[in-house]
Amino acid sequence: MAAAPPSTLATDPTTPPRVFSGIQPSGALHLGNYLGALRNWVALQDDADAVYCVVDLHALTLPKEPGEVARGTLDIARILLAIGLDPANVILFAQSHVHQHAELGWLMQTVASYGELSRMTQFKDKSNRSQNFISASLFTYPALQAADILLYDTDVVPVGDDQRQHIELARDVALRFNSRYGETFVVPEHRIPAAGARVMDLQHPENKMSKSVDSPQGTVNLLDTPKEIEKKVKRAVTDNDGEVRFDVDTKPGVSNLLSILAAATDGDPEQLATQYSQYGPLKADVAAALIALVEPIQARLTELDDATVRQVLDDGAERARSIAGPVMERAKVAIGLLV
Ligand code: TYM
């Protein structure tokens, strides 16, 4: 079997870590995306070598109208710039513009097992919710996600808690590939924030806030107006005992509000709980913190047009290809294709 370890894999303490993450262009971005992942994307851009991807191919795993994904890709990229990603600092691109993703995605399907993919909770959830058509790609999705990450010799993957299992699978397939075919891929680690890793739906606090679930009153979008945010937070489901206490199991609604407030203000949910004796003032502070969070993002958004965003994505794709191309070749050589 197996080629010698390529020298590029040697960890050099003087080079910044490579960070990679992705987001689907389906539906509006919500508070969970921001607090769980995007905030970290921005925070990491100065000290890491960051590569971020709008994963348009992943969005096709659930049926889409023609044109919907193209529009969604531009819209999401625009918001990513508005939240503070600086194209001078990061590579930002659309997944389908770098063909190596689909190509390595196939190789990853040969090293991921049916059993592993069957255990993915996101597949179980999404396939249970799809009433008519469950595409094969919904099942093989984590293999493509592993390819996304491994193509960039990624050290760190900033994500929310719901992606933990997918990143662990990416690690497992990288290790398996390396042991079958020789050291080829860097084995990545996830970076999940202490606060905001799992933002729950305001109406159904036992479920996570999600783009793919229809719960408009339970989901705070980054583009919601202050009035909409106030209304949604005011109507957030709590409970009847009237006590402000952080206890996810017995008080999921109140605990979610405390977690959101903690994530938005860099506080601690248990400590914050001691500052309130009623739900009303807690909700008012949560709404105010969220409005303060989204206002600057919405202001920056008005300065960005489609042409600017397209240019950023085109430049990003070119830079992404220059990294992904050689890694793809390395994988082909290692696995034993005629190159
Ligand atoms: P996606 O598009 O569903 O979500 C983007 C990011 O937002 C996080 N997130 C949340 N965090 C906290 N609370 C929530 N309620 C919440 N909802 C979403 C997600 O954890 C994610 O970090 N499979 C991925 C996209 C992907 C990817 C990748 C990620 C494709 N390839 C490679 C990392 C690396 C997804 O569907 O994310």
Image: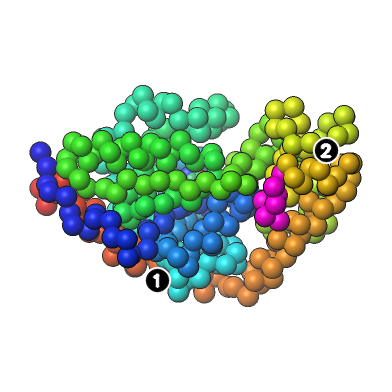
- Sequence-wise first label, 2 or 1: 2
In the figure, is residue 205 to the left or right of 198? right
**Which callout, 2 or 1, points to the residue nearer the camera?**
2
Amino acid carrying mark 1 in the image: Asp
Image point (77%, 46%), residue name: 272
Image quadrant holding the N terminus, namely top left
Residue 226 image-quadrant placement: bottom right
Residue 238 visible in the current orientation: yes
Q: Amino acid at mark 2?
A: Val
Residue drawn 47% across and 56% down? 54
| Label 1 element class | helix
Residue 228 x %, y % = 80, 53
Is 264 a magenta residue? yes
Residue 110 is left or right of residue 67, and the answer is left
Q: Is residue 287 above or below residue 86?
A: above
- Mark 2, secondary structure of its residue: loop
Q: Main secondary structure of the magenta part?
A: helix
- Residue bearing the label numbered 1: 315
Give residue 305's position: percent from left, percent from top: 58, 73
Relative to 320, residue 173 above or below: above
> For residue 38, what is the image quadrant?
bottom right
Task: For ligand 1, tell me if the residue under mark 2 lies within 8 Å.
Answer: no
Q: Residue at x 35, y 53 (%)?
A: 154
The magenta segment: 262-269
Residue picked out by circle 2 = 244
**Residue 233 appears at what percent x and percent y?**
80, 47
